[in-house]
Image (cartoon, rainbow, N blue to C red):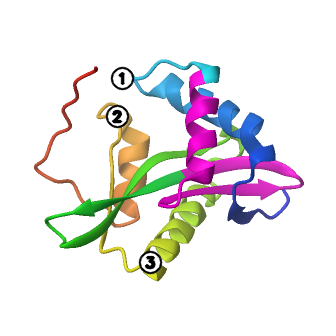
């Protein structure tokens, strides 16, 4: 297989990014895939000053992505990065693409003096949880709650 390059996402990547989110949202019980909604959110991220959208590209195809958004953390007394989407096309899973994407995201966060990365993962997605733990991510005592408006 071709070697992948990690790079910032561009507006012309939107179709591929939406397709990757379709894969991700099939796994996550809390979200329903809606291509128009996901496209709108991705387009907003691409122009947001405090957001990072990275893609893994191989042979001219986007084969993975991750997104992060800066937030202000009172616990850190500074910025944290909320990692929202990490997904790799099925035929590229297990080849180090997720690790490369998250490493690149961490490097960008460090260059912005961000003190902590955090993410939410579906509690039933055992492969993803094991993947994050292998990369040094730690469980917390916090749980996520939400309320729709």
Q: On screen, 42 above or below 77?
A: above
Assess whether mark 3 and mark 1 are in contact (beta carbons under 8 angstroms).
no
* SS type, badge 1: loop
What is the C-alpha distance between the residues marked 2 and 3?
28 Å
Label drawn at residue 122: 2
Q: What residue range appears in magenta?
A: 37-66
Q: Mark 3 points at which residue?
A: 112
The residue beneath circle 1 is 30
| Place of residue 4 in the rendered image (x, y in percent of width and height, measured from the top left) | 76, 62
Whole-number angstrom distance, CA of label 1 to CA of label 2: 8 Å
Q: Identify the image quadrant of the C terminus.
A: top left
Tag 3 or tag 1, which sits nearer the N-term? 1
Q: Residue 141 carries which label?
A: none
* Mark 3 secondary-structure assignment: loop
x and y percent of residue 146 in the render?
A: 22, 29
Dot 1, crowdedness within 10 Å: few (<14), some or many (≥20)? Answer: few
């Amino acid at each position: 297989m071709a070697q992948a390059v990690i790079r910032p996402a561009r507006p012309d990547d939107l179709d591929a990014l939406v397709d990757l989110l379709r894969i991700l949202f099939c796994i996550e019980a809390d979200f329903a895939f809606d291509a128009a909604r996901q496209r709108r959110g991705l387009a907003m991220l691409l122009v947001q000053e405090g957001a990072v959208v990275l893609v893994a590209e191989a042979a001219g195809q986007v084969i993975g992505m991750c997104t992060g958004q800066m937030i202000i953390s009172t616990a850190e007394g500074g910025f944290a990065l909320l990692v929202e989407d990490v997904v790799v096309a099925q035929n590229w899973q297990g080849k180090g693409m997720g690790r490369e994407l998250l490493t690149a995201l961490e490097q960008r966060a460090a260059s912005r003096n961000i003190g902590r990365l955090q993410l939410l993962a579906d509690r039933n997605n055992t492969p993803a949880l094991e993947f994050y733990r292998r990369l040094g991510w730690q469980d917390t005592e916090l749980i996520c709650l939400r309320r729709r408006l």
